[in-house]
């Protein structure tokens, strides 16, 4: 339809479980009536996955090399996706990229997946690098998804993403604010891999574990949990704060999983203070142990269809690209703490 714009939104999460691709059609004058035309998750080749998992340890030269390599992987993946599904070329590609580091307190954030390379390989206008401008404006550069929660999921007071990190959007008095709550799959997947599995499928391991109350209590004392929003987390928090606490207890991986899930559920419960429905999304939505723990804390969970659970973030990044293309606000100061609302992202093509 000529009165619609077709966009591919891309998300590469911190848990490195694949590139989420969401092909969306937005009616130009009524974006909330979007239609998801196709979506998929593209697995990373083993060498690229290993590099993304270890990228925080590399020097700048190596990071730039992987930035270009990842951009090439994205571009070729999009071309293959369009060809295999016999899809028309979209008007835009909108890519979150893969976060290397995120330290807004020292005004540094970096997401890789070179936009110029994606544009060159696909021939499609590309937007990326959504966080940097916000950090320069004094903001956290995250979360970015709340603009989509505000415009596309209007009926929910709470939108809870259970991904590599847990983040929440809260609508109150015609305003929206959002922030990261705690790490989730970055931790759970790490210990699942130690017992030979990419993740804790259905929460089958964690449901058999024994909760260690001393570890649970110590994790809950981390200072981040007592800070007021806006606030955001990066993988550094997991490496520097979470893992050292967990590892000194010398527990079995299954007991770690059980204890950490209770910790995450408890931290989430501290941020939901009424019985309003909570829209969930992200890979953690399939962890039955986590969902049971959230329910035990009295959280009123609303589970959407699996497409929204799996692709909500890439859907919303398509929206962020749409807004950026029209120079409309896609980054909210009430969410990030920046000095002003703004339209963020680098455009190529």
Image (cartoon, rainbow, N blue to C red):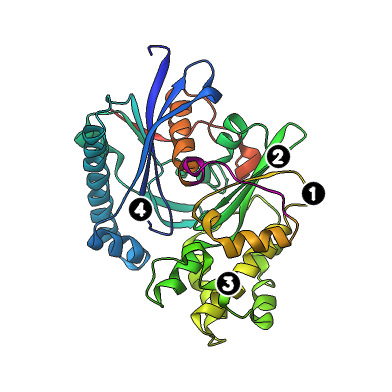
Q: Which residues are magenta?
A: 299-309
For the residues labelled 4 and 2, the Cα–Cα distance comes to 29 Å
Q: Which of the two labelled residues, at mark 1 and mark 3, occupies the earlier sequence position?
A: 3
Rounded to the nearest angstrom, the CA distance separating label 3 from label 4 is 26 Å
Q: Residue at x 71, y 43 (%)?
A: 277
Residue at disc 4, secondary structure? loop
Q: Are marks 4 and 2 in contact (CB under 8 Å)?
A: no
Say left or right for 316 vs 128: right
- For disc 1, the marked residue is 274
Give the residue pinned by disc 4: 18
Of callouts 4 and 1, which one flags the residue occurring earlier in the amino acid sequence? Answer: 4
Earlier sequence position, callout 4 versus callout 2:
4
Q: Point out the image quarter for the N terminus.
A: top left
Labels 3 and 2: the sequence-earlier one = 2
Using a 10 Å C-alpha cutoff, classify the residue at mark 4 as few (fewer than 14 neighbours), some (14 to 19) or many (20 or more). some
Which residue: 47% across, 33% down? 320
Q: Which residue is mark 2?
A: 157
Q: Position of residue 285 (x, y in %)?
A: 55, 54
Examine the rendered structure and indicate whether residue 207 appears above or below residue 172.
below
Q: Which is more foreground, mark 3 or mark 2?
A: 3
Let me know if residue 241 appears in the view.
no
User: Which callout, 3 or 4, points at the residue further toward the start of the chain?
Assistant: 4
Element under disc 1: loop
264 and 211: which is toward the camera: 211
SS state under label 3: helix
Q: Which mark is residue 255?
A: none
Q: Identify whether 156 is placed above or below 219.
A: above
Q: Is residue 320 left or right of residue 169?
A: left
């Amino acid at each position: 339809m000529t009165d619609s714009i077709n966009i591919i939104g891309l998300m590469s999460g911190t848990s490195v479980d694949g590139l989420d691709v969401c092909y969306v059609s937005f009616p130009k004058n009524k974006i909330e009536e979007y239609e998801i035309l196709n979506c998929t998750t593209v697995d990373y080749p083993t060498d690229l996955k290993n590099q993304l998992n270890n990228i925080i340890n590399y020097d700048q030269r190596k990071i730039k090399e992987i930035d270009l390599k990842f951009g090439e992987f994205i571009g070729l993946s999009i071309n293959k996706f369009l060809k295999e599904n016999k899809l028309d070329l979209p008007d835009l590609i909108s890519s979150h990229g893969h976060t290397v580091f995120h330290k807004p307190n020292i005004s540094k954030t970096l997401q890789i997946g070179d936009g110029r390379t994606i544009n060159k390989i696909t021939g499609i206008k590309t937007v990326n690098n959504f966080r940097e401008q916000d950090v320069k404006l004094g903001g956290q550069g995250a979360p970015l998804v709340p603009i989509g929660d505000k415009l596309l999921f209007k009926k929910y007071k709470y939108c809870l993403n259970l991904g590599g990190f847990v983040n929440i959007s809260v609508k109150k008095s015609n305003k929206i604010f959002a922030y990261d709550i705690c790490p989730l799959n970055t931790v759970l997947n790490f210990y699942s891999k130690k017992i030979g599995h990419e993740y804790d499928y259905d929460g089958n391991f964690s449901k058999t574990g024994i909760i260690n109350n001393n570890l649970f209590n110590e994790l809950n004392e981390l200072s981040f949990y007592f800070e007021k929003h806006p606030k955001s987390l990066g993988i550094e928090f997991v490496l520097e704060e979470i893992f050292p606490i967990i590892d000194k207890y010398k527990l079995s991986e299954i007991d770690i999983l059980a204890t950490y899930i209770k910790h995450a559920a408890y931290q989430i419960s501290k941020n939901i203070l009424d019985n309003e429905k909570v829209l969930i999304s992200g890979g953690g939505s399939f962890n039955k142990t986590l969902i049971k723990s959230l329910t035990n804390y009295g959280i009123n969970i609303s589970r959407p269809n699996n497409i929204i659970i799996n692709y909500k973030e890439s859907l919303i990044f398509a929206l962020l690209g749409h807004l950026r293309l029209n120079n409309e606000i896609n980054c909210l100061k009430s969410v990030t703490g920046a000095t002003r609302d703004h339209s963020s992202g680098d455009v190529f093509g």
